[in-house]
Image: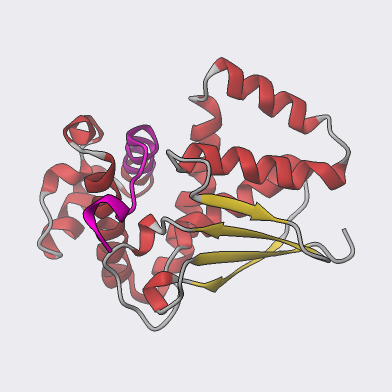
Amino acid sequence: MTRRDLPSLPLHFFRLFVDTLTVEIGHDSLVAILEEAGLPADLADPQAVSRHTGQSAAEAYARIQKALRVYYGRGARGMLVRIGRLLWGRLLESASLAERTRAQLIRVLPPAMRRQAALEMLARFICEKPSVMVVHAPDLGLRLVDHACAAAMGQTEANPVCYVTLGLLLENLFWATARDHDVEEISCRAAGGGECEFKIILEGM
């Protein structure tokens, strides 16, 4: 993978991630976790985000999540999913007027159409290029394929690691439909997959 092909993350998204994480677990706790992992403490400072490029933000995003997985062990999944769910609300609150108008339109679509439209809106929040995160609609389900895989950047794990994205998907779909959904990461670049792919089950909905 060349430098040009490395994942890139919108700085606004990264700032909201750091801010959400800081509010949820506390600034001092986050700094201690980062320092234990050998990471700079200023990664816990949302104001320092402006010093990043899209690629360095993606790298920091992955390294912070790894530090949290190591620190919390089995409890990391639930904590990071919760961060993702909270992050969706912050993304909506800080959205542009055009995106807020789009959100209002999504909420009045027929239920069967809301899911894909909501997922496509989420993809625009997370990715700088529209082709990086793509929603597919095969029979009896939806697939969200993340070709950038920022959360998996530089990671090698036995299991999928994109827990924040999973939380974002769960809250995004609940926001759109007022119903809980079953979402599973069926491929993760950190675990040897070609990309990070999420399966949304729609049977009976």
**Is residue 9 rendered magenta in the image?**
yes
Residue at the spot x=70%, y=47% of the render?
174
> Within the image, what quadrant is residue 121 found in?
top right
Residue at the spot x=28%, y=41% of the render?
54
Residue at the spot x=47%, y=58% of the render?
147
Q: Position of residue 29 (x, y in %)?
A: 23, 52
Residue 202 position (above or below residue 49): below
Q: Position of residue 161 (x, y in %)?
A: 42, 69
Using the image as rendered, state which of residue 172 and residue 149 is in the foreground. Answer: 149
Way the structure is coloured: secondary structure
Residue 201 position (above or below residue 25): below
Residue range highlighted in magenta: 1-20
Residue 172 position (above or below residue 5): above
Q: Position of residue 66 (x, y in %)?
A: 29, 65
Residue placed farthest to the top in the image? Answer: 97
Does residue 10 appear left or right of residue 173 in this picture? left
Residue 73 position (above or below residue 131): below
Count the marks: how many?
0
Quadrant location of the N terminus in the rendered image: bottom left
**Is residue 187 rendered magenta in the image?**
no
Using the image as rendered, state which of residue 69 and residue 63 is in the foreground. Answer: 63
Does residue 115 appear left or right of residue 171 in this picture? right
Q: Position of residue 30 (x, y in %)?
A: 23, 51
Q: Main secondary structure of the magenta part?
A: helix
